[in-house]
Image (cartoon, rainbow, N blue to C red):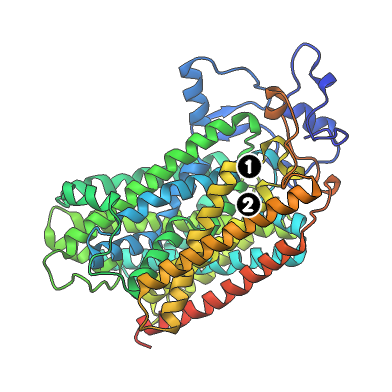
Amino acid sequence: MTDPTAATGAERPEAAKGPRPPTDLDRQLRDPVSAVLDSAHLGDIEGAFGKISVGDIGERHSLKKRLLTFAAISGPGLIVMVGDNDAGGVSTYAQAGQNYHTSLLWTLLLLIPVLVVNQEMVVRLGAVTGVGHARLINERFGKGWGWFSVGDLFVLNFLTIVTEFIGISLAASYAGISKYIAVPSAGVALIAIMASGSFQRWERAMFVFIAVSLVQIPMFFLAHPRYGTIGHDFVVPGIHGGVSSAAVLLIIAIVGTTVAPWQLFFQQSNIVDKRITPRFISYERADTVLGSFVVVIGAACIMVAADYAARGTRAFGNFTDAAGVAHLLAARGNGLGTLFAILLFDASILGAAAVTLSTSYAFGDVFGIRHSLHRGFKDAKAFYLSYSLMIAVAAGIVLIPGAPLGLITTSVQALAGLLLPSASVFLLLLCNDREVLGPWVNPKWLNLLAALIVGVLLVLSGTLMATTLFPSVNVTDVFVALAVALAAAGVVVVIGLRVVSRRSHQPILPPAPEVTEHEKLTWRMPPLTLLKPVKWSPALRVGILSLRGYLIAAVLLLIVKAIQLGGG
């Protein structure tokens, strides 16, 4: 895997001498100790559209070879992005279109850099470290912080899986199929797809669902889009009917469903499971960027279709659930209702597969059990049983008569938006940990952009808290005040860090180790037991504790807001 005796984690220069440079397999066989927890994560890359041998270190000079390599590598980025347009996503985007026309399209455009920045960081973490996100947090920040962070993931992911089965039941109801038939059948199918014992077969199944999701394209054109209005709403921020507490909640829900915490854990672990190494990071980055545009285009198609469904009817501004949008579209003709129901069902299946697998990956990381799609049921029983149990319990909840399914769906997406800042902070800390990423740590500009993203998310959640406590306040004034306060705090922190850096004559972050391009492409994280422990400054510890306390309060107030909007 790596040479643990090297000072920076890069392979020894003398190892490169000989007839050919050492491959990843050479290092894996040479080192008896590896950071990789599951040995099934080592070997050839086996993608849905091709295979790359672990010993293949040749340059890809021709366009054909690069395209073939991209085809083999692509998967984790597209799956995590399209899977994010799940049942909750379809419902949230449809609510935006039915209640606010297309006036919230601008939120999607702003989320593209958020998606790319967050997921690019986990691309590097997965390829360079060879271990999952949950294990890195647990090992680098201690079990207390690890459980606190991963505990959020388990709760949020389980609730998200429930929303996927809600989507399946709503799609089935449109087709006249009982949820007591559709939901259990979908659960069995999800388990069968995952338990094949072949990563390649699983990924091919995911690409089938991605292909089905393309029904959103004809749905968009059949919805008679108003191109001028759509173009305006993409680039000019606004909210139809003015800013309100409900609109802010919906915007947070859009953020939460488009940039969800489970994505960080899924893509990193899926990259590890696919055996992608630093040599192919550029291809996986391209896969991720492509996926980010696909997810935003899909979300826009849903908003436009929902706007068309309710436009000029009493249903405008009165969203109920995704099935209601399907019936409204059916009244418009052209098979729009059927297309929307197919999209909802497909999104629910793909989302359930990705979110549940993300949780099982994290389960394997935390408890140190075998967790790979390359293994069959006999070799990874706990991994597959955890997946199956989550599917069974989530499906069972949806089958409970009278459950408030619509309220659960919207609240879960907003909860994801509130918890994302916490996940992003730990992601930032890991991507600036030179023991973990060596020459692959974040550049300064990326840290500034990521910090800005976290700040915006905090302002949105803070606005929601303020409007919940004081319903009569002006939402715009609260948003602006919080943004100014957070910006001022950021300036104070930056100045303080610079003062400390000058007085101690040490840079805020130590310089990255100087390595050649070859050394960088073959650099892998040493075994976790050999890494120097993380040292937190008192200021950072106070900041993290404050963030966690704030988010706990925000989640409690979200529950209050959800009850208020539900008529409770």
Disc ID at residue 538: none
Residue beneath the point at 28% across and 47% down: 215
Measured Cα–Cα span from mark 2 to mark 1: 8 Å
Q: Amino acid at mark 2?
A: Leu
Instruction: Sort mark 2 into few (<14), some (14-19) or many (20+) by Cα contacts within 10 Å.
Output: many
Of all residues shown, which one is farthest toward the top? 19
Q: Residue 318's spot in the image, x, y percent?
A: 23, 74
Q: Amino acid at mark 1?
A: Asn
The residue that label 2 is drawn on is 428
Number of numbered discs present? Answer: 2
Q: Quadrant of the N terminus?
A: top right
Look at the picture and state if 554 lies above or below 81.
Answer: below
Q: Residue 82's spot in the image, x, y percent?
A: 42, 49
Residue beneath the point at 71% across and 41% down: 437
Q: Residue 466's spot in the image, x, y percent?
A: 45, 78
* Label 2 close to label 1 by CB (< 8 Å): yes
Q: Is residue 501 left or right of residue 291?
A: right
Q: Is residue 181 left or right of residue 198?
A: left
Instruction: Sort mark 1 into few (<14), some (14-19) or many (20+) by Cα contacts within 10 Å.
Output: many
Q: Residue 408's spot in the image, x, y percent?
A: 42, 74
Q: Quadrant of the C terminus?
A: bottom left
Residue 230 shows in this picture = yes
Q: Tag 2, which secondary structure?
A: helix
Residue 191 shows in this picture = no
Q: Tag 1, which secondary structure?
A: loop
Look at the picture and state if 545 lies above or below 218.
Answer: below
Task: Give the quadrant of residue 357.
Answer: bottom right
The residue that label 1 is drawn on is 442
